Amino acid sequence: MARRLSFTAAGVVVVIILVVAFVGLFMLRRPGTLEGQPTSIHLETVGAVASANEWPRPDDPHPDWVGYLPTTILRVPANATINVQIDQEDSATGLRNAFWGKVFGTEGNTMHMKYFDDKGNPQEGDITTIDPTQAAHTFAIPDLGVFVPLLGVSANAPAGSANIVTFSFKTKGPGIYHWQCFVPCGAKTIFGNGGPMQTLGYMAGELIVS
Amino acid sequence: VSTFRIEEADRPHIIRLVIIWVVLSAIAVIAELLFLQIPPGNQTVQGQDQTNTMLLMTALATPVFIGVVLMVIYSAIYFRRTGPELVDGPPMRGNTPVQVVWIAASTVIVLFLALVGISTLATNSSAQTVPGQPSSGTAGGAASEMQVQVIAQQWYFTYRYADYGGVETTHLYLPVDRPVVLHVTSLDIIHSFWAYQLGVKADANPGVDNVFHVTPQKLGSFQVRCAELCGIWHGQMSDSEGRVVSQSDFDTWIAQQQQDYAAIQKVVPSYAPYYFPVPLVKGS
């Protein structure tokens, strides 16, 4: 009887340790924070995090997931103008809500973009709206009212090219503001809503304003 | 038929219990009516109905609650066994008059509350007119029902105003004293549109037009949030910039929205009662 009790107690302890370890490791698993010039952010969006031009993550547990690189945890100062550059390397998926094809919340409600048109010719200009069906991702911080659609790289663009998007926005007071993509870009998940769309370090991020 | 009589020794207890019960119930009910703040409040006609219904039910339930708790506490104090030996109490049998009274009283209370609840539900799910205003639309359309579509998507609510060219906006503005029909739907998965100050909590499902009626009656702000676990940013799917404004302020605001979003409005699909999750994604 005592032996059976001992086995049972040991089993319960082992299960508790495993559960705590699993939850603890899950909680601790978090992408790094982007450090550097505090008012400038440089990001890269890719169709697969293992094959990026600038910050590839070949050892990533999900090498074929879409993602923002090098990380989606960004630290910026409060009440400041933040300059953002996004090198957009992914092809188009299309917005589920065409409304997000408009740029708003940035300075001048515009973005500057160097891109390749349908014929693969390089173009450049200030953009306020893109074709919603040609969106690859969006950079959206809803609580700051910032919504920026990112045009997919043209199929006729040279291999390895990227659309270079730059814009500025103003932060509010200190806090943690979530940011996200509005394009259902989680390939191989139901309606594109899962996987990278639901995971920090890929298409979900935090803007830490301090 | 059983006989029922109160023992002479129990009479002081009965009188004392009844007095305490009446006094505590009166104090509690008056305090509730005067001070209790029950959501959702009075920002809309429907919210006012819900608050009044909840207040009525609370006020009716209070004497019952106090009676039960009082009986337990009183018995524990005055009829507690003090001696060491266990002795059976006097045998108790059913008492027909008492049973008839309590069943009849319970039936009346429950049926009354059911009627009040059904009436409130019916009021909340049908078109409303503003007190003091005609039910039909006026020349300025002040009393006509305004159609507003609530579109949920991971992880934000947007709104389309069918009566204003289907313009889509990022915040919900409503004119005061004008009945509104909210058409709640979703673009992707199941969400729930919850604007509690308006008295509205409606499931947002893709492919479904979920209809709710509200009539704002008080200027001010309200909060919108999602009440259905919908993914990593469910907790952030909220907006505190909902506003109930005057008709003139609303006209100014909606005109500004139409101007601001004119370019994107050209490529936004025509207004429809609901939408299905498109596009599918590459590789799915």
Image: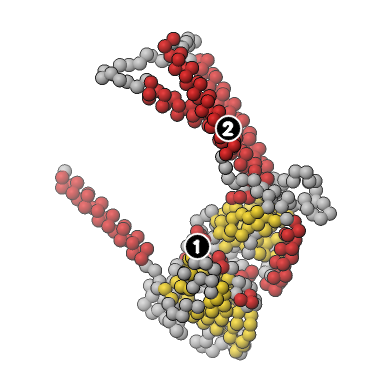
Residue B152's x, y, as percent? 59, 60
Residue A200's x, y, as percent? 44, 68
Can you say whether A78 is above or below B75 in the image?
below
Query: What residue do we see at 41% from left, 15% from top?
Result: B92
Give the residue type that dot 2 points to.
Answer: Ile
Distance from Cα at disc 2 to Cα at disc 1: 43 Å
The answer to whether residue B17 is seen in the rendering is: yes
Give the residue type that dot 1 points to.
Answer: Trp
Q: What is the secondary structure assignment of the residue under circle 1?
A: loop
Query: What residue do we see at 49% from left, 24% from top?
Result: B20
Q: Splitting the image into 4 quarters, where does residue B148 fall?
A: bottom right
Mark 2 closeness class: few <14, some 14–19, many ≥20 residues within 10 Å: few
The answer to whether residue A46 is seen in the rendering is: no
Query: What residue do we see at 65% from left, 57% from top?
Result: B243
N-terminal label among 2 and 1: 2
Q: Residues at marks 2 and 1, common chain? A: yes
Left or right, residue B75 beside residue B121:
left
Q: Which residue is mark 1?
A: B233
Q: Splitting the image into 4 quarters, where does residue A118 fall?
A: bottom right
Q: What is the secondary structure assignment of the residue under circle 2?
A: helix
Foreground of the two, A116 or B169 = B169
